[in-house]
Amino acid sequence: MPKRGYNPSTSEEDKIPIVEKLYRENQESDFIGGGFCDDDDLVEEKREQFAEARQKRADERANKILAPENCEKCQNPLLDSWLWQRYSCAICDSCRNEKGEHKLLARTEAKNLYLLKDCDLDLRKPILRFWAKKNPHNPRYGDMKLYLKLQVEARAIEVHGSLEQIELKKELKEQAKEVRSEKQFEKKLKTLRQQIKGASSHTTKIASGPHRHVFGNEKHIGNDLWKRTCETCDYEEEFEKM
């Protein structure tokens, strides 16, 4: 069997696995929000299983990496670091800013805040690590996936180019949403007007009773034939007249 040759001209797009390409193509755009399908729950369940499997592999690889000697912030020895253990972020516990760049974001919040798609979190390399935590609102729900804000923001810049581009896309998305709302309102208003007009016309017909022709002047056609037209409905009637 001949060996597959190496093509140095292969682009980065060609290196992306076909599974990832198909996944991206089926992701909704930043400006369109879809509805719900009958198999949405099944798709979401499968997606959760794949995400958990990928996260498990990412955790296993991360545990094999030796922690750096010093904290990236204070340069002190990195003795205790919850962020390194959970997110592979070389920040010591003393330098951790829980309300700032080291804040934890739920998956939905991260996607909405930075206009990210599932493939940006689950497939784009390196895969972002998350902390699975029981849902505080209802334990029967699935675990919450909490991402590190610092890493999510870096991924968003990688996807969109800059934070300014994200804000611009948010404005465009909001404008598109307003346009859709206006069109839906105008459509409903038009339907309502048609219903009112139809009901009014039907009521007028009932109140006025059956139509009675009001003929205008008679017009001679030829020989003994004559014609007359109703002035209200344009009905034409031909008759003989001696």
Image (spheres, rainbow, N blue to C red):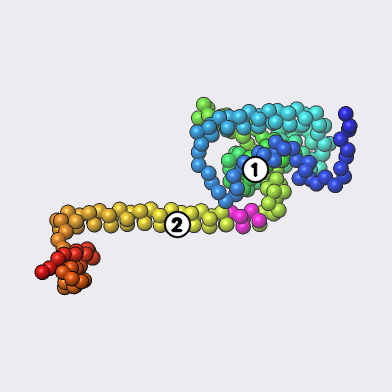
Q: Which quadrant, please, contains the N terminus?
A: top right
Which residue is located at x 19 percent, y 64 percent? Answer: 237
Residue 160 location (% of width, % of height): 68, 51
Q: For this view, does 65 lie left or right of residue 27?
A: right
> Given the image, on which type of amino acid does mark 1 rest?
Glu
Instruction: Give the secondary structure at mark 2.
Output: helix
Per the image, label 1 sits on a secondary structure element best described as: helix
Q: Is residue 66 left or right of residue 144?
A: right
Q: Residues within 10 Å of mark 2 (few under 14, many from 20)?
A: few
The mark found on residue 25 in the picture is: 1
Does the magenta-highlighted stretch encompass residue 23? no
Nearer to us in this view, 177 or 11: 11
Residue 118: quadrant of the picture:
top right
User: Seen in the image, is 3 located left or right of residue 17?
Assistant: right
Measuring from the top left, give residue 214's x and y in whole percent.
15, 66
User: Residues in magenta?
Assistant: 165-170
Which one is in front, 135 or 36? 36
Q: Residue at x 89, y 32 (%)?
A: 2
Query: Quick one: quadrant of the C terminus?
Result: bottom left
Most common SS among magenta residues: helix
Q: Is residue 197 visible?
A: yes
| Residue 143 appears in the figure | no
x and y percentages locating residue 68 in the rendered image = 82, 36
Numbered label attached to residue 206: none
